[in-house]
Image (cartoon, grey):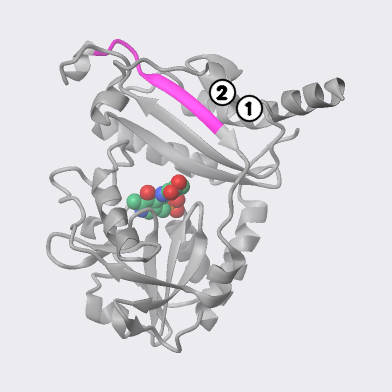
Amino acid sequence: MKRKTQTKTKKEKNIVFLDGEYVYKENAKVSIFDHGLLYGDGVFEGMRSYNNLCFRLEEHLDRLWESAHTLMLEIPYTKKQLQDIVIKTLQKNKLKDAYIRLVVTRGSGDLGLDPRKCKKPTIFVITDKIVLYPDTLYKEGIEIITVPTVRNHPEAVNPSIKSLNYLNNILAKIEATTAGYLDAIMLNHQGYVSECTGANIFIVKDGQLLTPPSHMGALKGITRQAILDNARDAGLPNEERALTRHDLFNADECFLTGTAAELMPVVKIDNRIIGLGKPGKITSKLTTAFKKLTKVEGVKYSL
Ligand code: PXG
């Protein structure tokens, strides 16, 4: 009996990478003086692996580097080194299918917000089993609302920076969940549609696939790009275009995209039924094409 318990505990121990070392998650500690914690000063990526293939890992690292560059945060590894660290963390945890969180903070400093006080960035990688959304949401589609909190102005905190400062999105999420909805559509400071709290948004109108351009306040999502690539490959007309709430309400189809959710059909927005009120045909085709892509695109690893 005792032996059985021990084996189980050992098997379940999760290993994370933290500042050059692989440690058990209960031993992974960062300082309360870390500016990632004190100020949200840092960047991150949320990634996913499918059957030993880390989906578009290089693209995620490119985005991480771009976010860090804007914040003048120097990552003390090469992209290749960080890629190897991600893969090694997955291997150590024997994860075929995983959710991966890669975080780079400004590091530990004093209580002033001047980043020069922080001598070296804190870097960690967490890998874990992926928690999937219930199947019914994909089959039936979800209902979401627009909320009062507007997306960050690009000249304040540019939404293209995937920073640790998610308060803008969290405020919108609170507004959605307190109203009884799963997610919120955020409008930008001009009233145009930007994105959801952790996902990009697409519509289909008259056979054309449309999504807001990043300068309207959308993160350049890796899934978003994969969908645009698939549409281009399939000859499906597509465009990055400014969208209003009116455009959403009168769309034939609507769906959200993100690493965790993949493609999530949307069937009602602010009480208006979208299209036929059920997941659309093009959404379904793009879902199939995306699933295919997750089988072939990325960095392969063995366990
Ligand atoms: N917009 C925002 C604001 C995001 O945070 C996306 C769009 C979609 O981007 P990707 O590259 O994932 O297609 C995101 C990504 C989570 C979680 O735990 C959130 C994201 C990614 C992974 C996990 O809620 N957001």
Q: Residue at x 54, y 38 (%)?
A: 100
Q: Residue at x 30, y 70 (%)?
A: 145
Report the residue marked by disc 2: 25
Q: How many marks?
A: 2
Relative depth, front residue between 68 and 267: 267
Mark 2: which secondary structure?
helix
Dot 2 amino acid type? Lys
Query: Which mark, by number, is residue 79?
Result: none
Q: Residues within 10 Å of mark 2 (few under 14, many from 20)?
A: some
Q: What is the span of residues highlighted in magenta in the rendered image?
A: 118-126
| Residue 2, placed above or below residue 298 | above
The residue positioned farthest toward the front in the image shown: 1
In-image side of 201 versus 111 (left or right): right
Quick one: quadrant of the N terminus?
top right
Relative depth, front residue between 124 and 73: 124
In-image side of 106 versus 29 (left or right): left
Residue 125: image x %, image y %? 51, 28
Dot 1 amino acid type? Asn
Query: Hey, which quadrant is residue 249 in on the image?
Result: bottom left
Residue 221 visible (yes or no): no
Residue 212 visible (yes or no): yes
Relative depth, front residue between 117 and 27: 27
Report the residue marked by disc 1: 14
Question: Do the residues under discs 2 and 1 have CB atoms within 8 angstroms?
Answer: yes
Whether disc 2's CB lies below 8 Å from ligand 1 is answered: no
Residue 24: image x %, image y %? 60, 19
